[in-house]
Image (cartoon, rainbow, N blue to C red):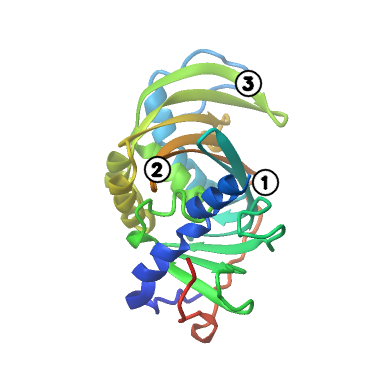
Amino acid sequence: MVVHQHGQRRGRAAGEAVLAVGVAAAIAAMSGCGGSASAGDDRPPADPAAAVRAAADALTRAGSAQARTAMEMATGGTRVTIRGEGGVDFKNRMGQLLVMLPADAAGKEEHRPITELLVPGALYMKNRGAGVPDDKWVRVDTTTLADGNLVTGGATDPLAAAELLRGAQEVRYLGETDLAGTKVRHYQGTTDIGRAAQSASPGVKGALEAAAKGFAKDTVPFDAYLDQEGRLRKVRHRFSYVNNGVIDVSSTTLLYGFGTPVSVLLPASRDIYAGKIAE
């Protein structure tokens, strides 16, 4: 599989415009309206922070998983939620999501779901709207985005969501709970984006380094749920993002169906849109 690296010169301009998919789209809608333990053992881990930091490595060992995402944004007392669904290949650092915008988020009653391809250093989107032809893709260099694509695409890249936990600190173990029939361990704490970037895998490091400069706060509160094998099953991050004021963003990622094959086919150069993207 060949990952195309074309479009570098226009990556930054496209990156700025594409914020409308996540943050700006939400604003439009608003204005319009680690080790495992034995099963059943509820004793706290010796080092809860170490268990959380190891979650990304456990996902790499798992190989792949299905994913659901939900991003809730709030400003001025109004909330909107953007949902996504797809799969992630953790070994090859690639994924695909179908992202559903809320009604009116694109300036009209209905908007077709956006297909997003996630690869190291880049985000591809189809059905982007904003003047992009229906048969064309938009490619964005995620290392040029102020948030490293933790918020921009309307869904936090599940791989980045896990890698972000490498900066976990002040972690508390809150006990076992049930998640869709699976016993999981609940951890709560904060993670430092800059610290996570230092320890992140090469495919995510650049995006997290960019994100460390783009958020209102360096630390990000989280709730993480790990199964008995140390795999991340659910994580909720709470970001404070600066975009014409501070926007509170809650991003939730659910992972299941581990080992399910995930295929990501990148678009050819001729299918990448080179024109101007409307605001």
Which mark is in front, 3 or 2?
2
- Whether pointer 3 and pointer 2 mark residues with C-beta atoms closer than 8 Å, the reply is no
What's the mark number on residue 112?
A: none
Mark 2, Cα crowd under 10 Å, few <14 / some 14-19 / many 20+, is many
Q: CA distance from mark 3 to mark 2?
A: 31 Å
Report the number of numbered marks: 3
Residue 141 in view (yes/no): no
Residue highlighted by disc 1: 257
Q: Secondary structure at mark 2?
A: strand
| Front-most of residues 41 and 194 | 194
Question: In the rendered image of this protein, does residue 270 appear above or below residue 171?
Answer: below
How far across and how far down the image is residue 75, in percent? 50, 38
- Residue type highlighted by circle 2: Tyr
Q: Residue furthest top?
A: 43
Residue at mark 2 to residue at mark 1: CA–CA distance: 31 Å
User: Residue 126, relative to residue 171: is it above or below?
Assistant: below
For marks 2 and 1, give the one nearer the viewer: 2
Identified by mark 1, the residue type is Gly
Give the residue at x 33% y 41%. 193
**Residue 173 location, x and y as percent?**
47, 18
Q: Which residue is mark 2?
A: 241
Secondary element under disc 1, as helix, strand or loop, is loop
Q: Which residue is mark 3?
A: 177
Q: Amino acid at mark 3?
A: Thr
The reply to whether discs 2 and 1 touch (Cβ–Cβ < 8 Å) is no
- The residue positioned 55% from the left and 24% from the top of the image is 185
